[in-house]
Image (cartoon, coloured by chain):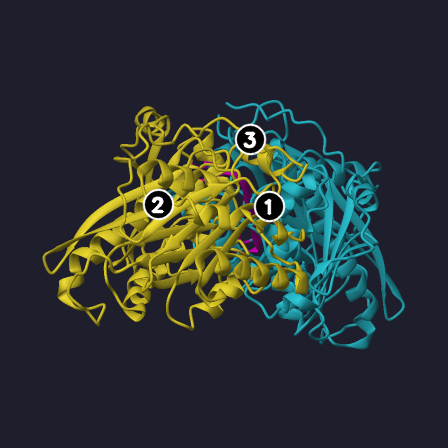
Chain colours: A yellow, B cyan
Amino acid sequence: MASAKTVPVSPLAPTHRPDLPAIAGVGLATAQAGIRYSARTDVLYVALAEGTQAAGVFTRSRCPSAPVDWCREALKSEGARALVVNSGNANAFTGARGRDAVALTAAIAGRAADCAPQAVFIASTGVIGEPLDATKFEGVLADCAGRVDGGSAAWSAAAEAIMTTDTFPKLATRQARIDGTVVTLNGIAKGAGMIAPDMATMLSFAFTDAALPQAVLQDLLSAGTAKSFNCVTVDGDTSTSDTLMLFATGAAGNAAVTDAADPRLADFKAQLDDLLVELAQLVAKDGEGARKFVTVRVEGATDDTSAHRIAMSIANSPLVKTAVAGEDANWGRVVMAVGKAGEPADRDRLGIWFGDVRVAHAGARDPDYSEAAASAVMRESDIVIRVELGLGTGTARVWTCDLTHDYIAINGDYRS
Amino acid sequence: MASAKTVPVSPLAPTHRPDLPAIAGVGLATAQAGIRYSARTDVLYVALAEGTQAAGVFTRSRCPSAPVDWCREALKSEGARALVVNSGNANAFTGARGRDAVALTAAIAGRAADCAPQAVFIASTGVIGEPLDATKFEGVLADCAGRVDGGSAAWSAAAEAIMTTDTFPKLATRQARIDGTVVTLNGIAKGAGMIAPDMATMLSFAFTDAALPQAVLQDLLSAGTAKSFNCVTVDGDTSTSDTLMLFATGAAGNAAVTDAADPRLADFKAQLDDLLVELAQLVAKDGEGARKFVTVRVEGATDDTSAHRIAMSIANSPLVKTAVAGEDANWGRVVMAVGKAGEPADRDRLGIWFGDVRVAHAGARDPDYSEAAASAVMRESDIVIRVELGLGTGTARVWTCDLTHDYIAINGDYRS
């Protein structure tokens, strides 16, 4: 059995771990099922009150994991009573055995939660292609169900149990008002490698006590994802297991709302978006080997979609990311990445900034450019690269991290 | 002035540097113009006999370099009399000054070669965004024109002068028959970083004494590129300067051929394709930091285009490439890369091989899979990854290298 790697905590980790408040109708417990890791928790069990609604956004991989298939199917029938997440094994590309393992997990959790298997949601993260022995959940999940807790320590333990090569747990919380009723939103995430557009985290789960129907939840989650997790990339690789789910217990007893566009949801929507952005940024800040957090802003593109593609081309370029790692204000590589995106761009109108330092203007080096000022920007741990295309009003903002020796070290020897 | 980095020669470099024969109508000379490097040649001048025809394939970047713009324009008028290549400065994203520098270079070379500027072709490689001082070519090119040579030492020197972070010069030669007449093909290339699909070398130049009209040359070069340089990737980044040109002096005096599909060109086409494949493979073998040469074969896709996209997704995946660097037969990452390509794939039909070892079959780990046998394959310096999709008859073959610490080291500190 492998030990979890001991990698130093990312220098971009928040200095303070937030205390998450309890959410009525959500109880959490973690355990050591011995899936792959020793001497650490590797299972999260979440009990959800009767009446809980669920929504999900999943990987666009053409080869999704067995748990992703399961969740997509389970969302077709309303209601969620339990969430089971394990780390250490992704149960991906495991064929018929993978489907059996998911079904067995749901059956075990259903007995623990006293619900139908279809009300159980499952996510797995870790190595791909190794059979997952779901019999290890036998007893473990029932034990979890008997000791669930909603306090801040339980949230913290939950965020830790789902980590793989993450160097710090990721948690965030918000409050919102729906027609006068205060509701709470909590979220946890795990990321690290294989983070890419079109679902940019391995796993993230958000919970609220708001009372919202499934269709509304799904609309809100899909819209929020487009501005958060779909705007973060570590290495351009897309996991087979990417899963983002939102569960709403309804315990807050707010007024019934049946349309995601209802103005009474404006604050909830804003807070949900904000929560998702915070979690997505935490994923980038814990990108494997990350030493610098990079925000790429693109303005003046022909439209937002074009701006997003250009921003992702910059954020995914190994040459841009190694330049950031080397604290080199190498704007030539930014030009290269703009050019390779294949989107409308006029070389002679490009402007490029590192932080507040304009390094390129009208298709050439800015005559007032100061190498010293640009270098000072690059030495910061939080760097903004801004590109002005001068063609239209399309904008985009994405987040990434630098590409360092540690990325190679972590991924060149992951399985051993 | 920066010194060229002293990086150890790639372990994938050929043990033998080929002796290239003379090609009637082609004379070469190199010089030290002091563009950026000290104590090494940085200019190649090639004199081409009157009547020489040219063809070119260039970067698809939306922000091409000034020399690329120049060559595209120059190809509109027939005839080539000189080629000037400099290393150290790409003259890319240099605005109006970049266009002026190209025009001045062409004027200086035109005087040296006694030809119109439009008969001069220009390529530049090196740092982006720095103005190129073309006055440094004054005198240098005339001197070169006075001492051109066609012997094997001159070809070797030519391949060396165009290197940037390359660790070895890249040369190849072939002979072909056109309707009974023997013709020769020589080629040189430089690559290293910023190598990607849709033109996968920084610079490559091929020369032949065959007599072929421009339109035929262009058809042959475009077709050959699709199967060679467009099938190689190092880091997925696309240079602003990618240039592949083919020059035909006509000195061999073969029978006139006016159609690329003429059966009398079958051997020439085969030999040209083969030359381009060899040069493209040399580029992958000298990928920045490369320790292993990787061939990715995809079979059973719905069509060839789909197969090519899946192969490129595998070849560009940082997680696949770091696994190869770590000698880890991590086929789960290959599944991930197949899934993220967005092309038709059925998880439960996938088969994956490392070398001759089938590691995955019908959507799961091969029951007969031997970790020891797969590990032995991964320890080789030449690795074939094969994916069978089981959907149709589409095939593709692409080449890449592993992603190592040295890639980070080379690119994290390139400009300093």
State which chain disc 1 sits on.
B
Which mark, by number, is residue B343? Answer: none
Which of labels 2 and 1 is toward the front?
2
Q: Locate residue B367, reporting x and y percent.
A: 79, 57
| Quarter of the figure that contains the C terminus of chain A | top right
State which chain disc 2 sits on.
A
The residue wearing badge 3 is A405
Callout 2: helix, strand or loop?
Answer: helix
Q: Locate residue A261, reporting x and y percent.
A: 20, 68
Q: Is residue A65 left or right of residue A258?
A: right
Q: CA distance from mark 3 to mark 1?
A: 14 Å
The residue wearing badge 1 is B319
Q: Which residues are magenta?
A: B116-133
The residue depicted at 22 percent of the width and 51 percent of the height is A271
Q: What's the residue type where badge 2 is placed?
A: Leu
The residue depicted at 26 percent of the width and 42 percent of the height is A21
Taking the magenta stretch, the answer to whether it contains residue B339 is no
The residue wearing badge 2 is A279
